[in-house]
Amino acid sequence: MLISILVNFVPIIIAIVLHEVAHGYAACWCGDNTAKQHKRLSLNPLRHIDVFGTLILPAILLLAKTGFIFGWARPVPVNYANLRHPKRDILLVASAGIITNLLLALVSALLLLLVPYVAHRLTQGIITLFLLNMIIFNVVLAVFNALPVPPLDGSKILLGWSDNPRIQKFLNSYRGGSVFIILIAFVIPVISRYFGYDFNPFGYYLIKTSKYLISLFI
């Protein structure tokens, strides 16, 4: 049980927490200390955990054997008005989490090369599973957050530079974006299967894109 938690849940918590911390540090570097003031630059998972997105959802997806696992933490607060160069810095802040996840996947892939030098076979197997999950979870989280749907990072990367009021309203439509993600990820696939169709664009994008990127690391 302890080993299962170690190799399955610790990697996704690391991926999610460092994703959010990266946003906070990027914002600080660009002039906004809001995350620091709210003590969200900490590596303590308890400061970042969203009960549903960090714990319940990944567990449900793992137990349901959906073929992919993702989740999210409480977003790090950022006051974009404090950024020194808003149009440039919003891109840096938004992409920091995705870049961090891909770097974590790369580091994990490099560490995999050292596993054969571990003498104990059981320890070797545990480390291998842990690092493989680090690669998989970090890639999936990066691909998921690249979607151009609020509140995900991809929406700010694609449109954060715009001053258009309608676009800004779209970027701030967190509740609407979350509902859209739930619909396209869970509700629509279930309904389509009920009527005999296999329509799952979210799963297709997440699985196909993640598999391609993972193949580059492993």
Image (spheres, rainbow, N blue to C red):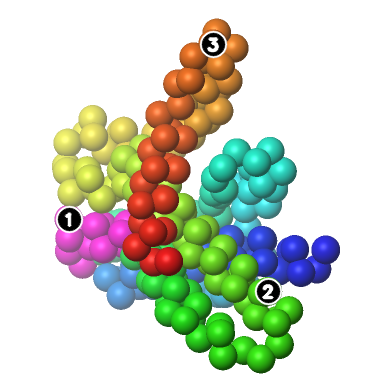
The three-letter amino acid code for the residue at tag 1 is Lys
Q: Reading the chain from its start, which is encountered first: label 1 or label 3?
A: 1
User: Residue 87: which disc?
Assistant: 1
Taking depth in this image into account, of 108 and 90 the one nearest to the observer is 108
Query: Can you identify the residue that label 2 sits on?
Result: 126
Residue 43 in the image: state x and y as whole percent: 57, 74
Disc 2 secondary structure class: helix
The region drawn magenta spans 84-98
**Number of marks:** 3
Question: Of discs 1 and 3, which sits in the foreground?
Answer: 3
The three-letter amino acid code for the residue at tag 3 is Gly
Question: Of discs 2 and 1, which sits in the foreground?
Answer: 2
Q: CA distance from mark 2 to mark 3?
A: 40 Å
Query: Can you identify the residue that label 3 sits on?
Result: 196
Residue 9 in the image: state x and y as whole percent: 67, 61
User: Residue 216: which disc?
Assistant: none
Are the two marked residues, 2 and 3, in contact with CB atoms closer than 8 angstroms? Answer: no
